[in-house]
Image (spheres, helix red, strand yellow):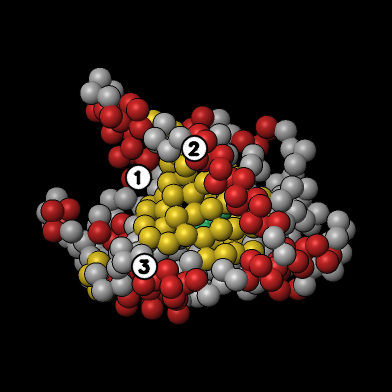
Amino acid sequence: MAEVVRSSESWARSLPSENVQALAQELGDTCMDIPQMYIRPELDVGVKAICDDDDDDDKGGSDDKVPIIDMNRLLDPNFSLEESAKLHSACMNWGFFQVVNHGVCDEVIEKIKVDLEEFFKLPLKEKEVFAPLPEVLCGIFKDHQSMRMNYYPPCPKANQVLGINPHTDAGGLTLLLQVRDVQGLQIKRKGKWLPVEPLEHALVVNIGDALEILTNGAYASVEHRVMVNNKKERLSIAAYHSPSFDKIIGPLPELVQGSGKEYYKTMKYEKYLEFQFLAKVEGKNHMEFMKLNK
Ligand SMILES: O=C(O)CCC(=O)C(=O)O
């Protein structure tokens, strides 16, 4: 149930919700008549809604925390080996990590957050002006960087709706800024959904399908979804770094050497996106067609 302002393809499929912010305002605090398309009955079973007044009981121990990578340590000769190993392990075993001391100064991060909040306060008509941007941006962003701004309204029936369905990102790397201290992003780990706690000034990074394919499966693109909060609105901004459409993606020969096996097909990224787009959105199922059973 996210309102999404995107600058490129909508591979992280959210529900068709062009003006969910307006809808939420219309429904008011009680949200009694949430349209059926937003209700996910399966969520009622065994999934806890994210409540603003939750205590910390559910946050899990340090084993259940998404790894934090410190760029200062990565660049410091005294610590770089240790931190690189941590990064490598995060990419292999988690597919997600949070980066701190990344070099983007706090003022810039704060400004982005304020701008995003201001943006979502604009009347719908003004926001819509940004809708035709995709084509324009596609031409400009030759290397296929794209951006998406997400708005998740609060919903008292938070255990019945999803902000974004379980999915993986199609591209290489995604960088995400969680605006405000509102938890919502969850990753699938060992069969369970694990929250990615917002960390001040940190950027969340995750591996996309293209990188999993290029690394012959060494690095994993991990299923994630977004829950809405029962009281607070949540905002996020994601920057996707993806191959150009005409680039060929397949296991890199250097990375195949070790196992001697290619675990994924090789094809144009554009073709991959076509398959991905047509596949039924169910977490990571769409990757099956890319796998080679050797
Ligand atoms: O809003 C978030 O935290 C995550 C958004 C997301 O998964 C996406 O844009 O692909």
Name the residue located 36 percent from the left edge and 57 percent from the top edge. Answer: 241
Q: Hey, what amino acid is under mark 3?
A: Ile
Q: Is mark 1 within 8 Å of ligand 1?
A: no
Q: Is residue 273 left or right of residue 191?
A: left
The quarter holding residue 178 reads: top right
Name the residue located 64 percent from the left edge and 66 percent from the top edge. Answer: 127
Q: Is residue 137 above or below residue 173?
A: below
Q: Hey, what amino acid is under mark 2?
A: Ala
Q: Is residue 116 above or below residue 266?
A: above
Is disc 1 surrounded by few (<14), some (14 to 19) or many (20+) residues within 10 Å?
many
Is disc 2 surrounded by few (<14), some (14 to 19) or many (20+) residues within 10 Å?
many
Q: Which residue is mark 2?
A: 202
Q: Which residue is mark 1?
A: 91
Residue 125 at x, y percent in the picture: 69, 71
Q: Which residue is mark 3?
A: 140
Is disc 3 surrounded by few (<14), some (14 to 19) or many (20+) residues within 10 Å?
few
Q: CA distance from mark 1 to mark 2?
A: 17 Å
Name the residue located 43 percent from the left edge and 41 percent from the top edge. Answer: 97
Q: Is residue 107 above or below residue 114?
A: above
Helix or strand or loop: what does disc 1 sit on? helix
Q: Is residue 135 above or below residue 258?
A: below
User: Can residue 126 be seen from the camera position used here?
Assistant: yes
Residue 63 at x, y percent in the picture: 49, 32
Helix or strand or loop: what does disc 3 sit on? helix
The disc, 1 or 3, on the residue closer to the chain's N-terminal end is: 1
Of the two numbered discs 3 and 2 in the rendering, the one whose residue sits closer to the viewer: 3
Q: Nearer the viewer, residue 135 or 168?
A: 135
Mark 1 and 3 residues: CB-CB less than 8 Å, in contact?
no
Name the residue located 31 percent from the left edge and 72 percent from the top edge. Answer: 245
Q: Hey, what amino acid is under mark 1?
A: Cys
Q: Nearer the viewer, residue 93 or 276?
A: 276
